[in-house]
Amino acid sequence: MSEPEEQTGLALGLTLIAALLASILLTLPKYAGLGVHPVQITFLRYITGILALLVYYGVKGMIQRGRNTPESTPQREYENWTWLHILRAVMATVRVTCTFAAVSIIPLANAQAILLTNGVFMMLFASIFLHEKVPAIAIWLGAACIGGGFLAADPDLADPGSWLSIGAGLAFIAAILFGLEAVIIKFTAVRDSNRRILFTVNFAALVISAIPAFWLWTPMPFDTLKFLLVMGPIAILVQTCNMEALRRARASIIVPMRYTVVVFGLLIGIAIFSEFPSIQAPIGMAVIVLSGAFLAWSTNRRQRKMLTRT
C-alpha cells in the first residue's frame, strides 16, 4: 500500500530540511570556531542539546497535562541498558569531536561525503554483532561507497604517501564510530525508552566532554560563542525532522534523500568558504551518493519482501 501523496511530500520536505540543517550544523563551528578546540565545541554542542531536550520534554509534558492525556501511550516494561548508553556516549563524544576537527581542516562537502560512508560500516557491524545477513550486492555497493570516500578525500594521486590527509582520516574515524553507534541504537531502541536513551547519552557525553573541554578551554568572543550555542537545538531539530519524516513515508523513499547533505555542503562550501573541489572529489561524492542511496533502497526493499513472506 503506497503512502498518501501529501504525507510523502511532507516527509520529503522534512528530510530536505533535516539535510540543510545538518549542513548548517557543521558550517557553524567551521565558520565561527577558528581557534576554538574541537573538544570545546563538542562540550557546547552537548550542553545546549541537554537544554533543548529539557525544554522539549517540559513543553510536551505541559501540553499533555493541559489535554488531560496520559503521560505515555503504551504501558510497557523497559530494560535498563545504561552501560550501553554510556558506551555509545563515549563513541558519540569522540565522533562529534572528530567531525568538528575534520570540517575545520578539509572542505565541508568532502567531509560530509566521507561521513556518509557510515552506512557501510553500520552494515558491517550489524552483520558482526547482530548477525544480520549481508547480500552480495550490498558488499559490492559498500565497496564502491568506500572507494568513493577515498576519492572524496581529494587525494594527491601523484603522491601515494598523501592519499589520506589528517582531516579525511578524522572523517573516516567519525563514520566508523557512527556505524557502531547505529548498531547500538538499533539494539537499544526497542529495549529502552526514548527519553531515557536521549537523556542518558546526551548527559554522559556532556560529562565526558567537560573534563578535556575545561582543560583545553580558551576564551572566545561572544560573536563566536553565539554561533556555537545554537548547535544543540539544531541537532535536536535534525533528529526530530528525520523521525517525523520516517513516520510519514517509507524508508526506501526517505533515506536516499538524506544524501542531499552533500549538495548542500558543496553549495555552502563554495558560497561561504570559497571551497572549489578538484575533479576527483565530485566523482567520489557522486559514487557515495549513488551507491549509498541504492544500498539503502535495496536493503529496505529486501526487508519489505521478507516481511510480506511471513
Image (tube, grey):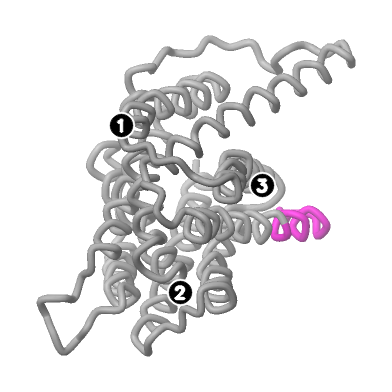
Residue 243 visible in image: no
- The furthest residue to the right: 67
In the displayed structure image, the side of residue 101 where residue 44 appears, left or right: right
- Residue at (47% x, 59% y) in the render: 30
As helix, strand or loop, the secondary structure at mark 1 comes to helix
| Quadrant of residue 164 within the rendered picture | bottom left
Q: Residue 293's x, y, as percent?
A: 48, 66
Is 38 inside the magenta-drawn segment?
A: no
Amino acid type at circle 1 is: Trp
Q: Residue furthest left?
A: 161
**Could you tell me which secondary element the residue under label 3 belongs to?**
helix
What amino acid is labelled 3 in the image? Cys
The range drawn in magenta is 1-13
Residue drawn 49% across and 24% down? 197
Residue 205 spot, x, y in % from top left: 40, 29
Dot 1: few (<14), some (14–19), or many (≥20) neighbours within 10 Å? Answer: few
Where's residue 259, x and y in %? 52, 65
Which residue corresponds to mark 2? Answer: 290
Question: Nearest the camera: 30 or 298?
Answer: 30
Identify residue for label 1. Answer: 215
Gap in angstroms between the C-alphas marked 3 and 2: 23 Å
Q: Which mark is residue 241?
A: 3
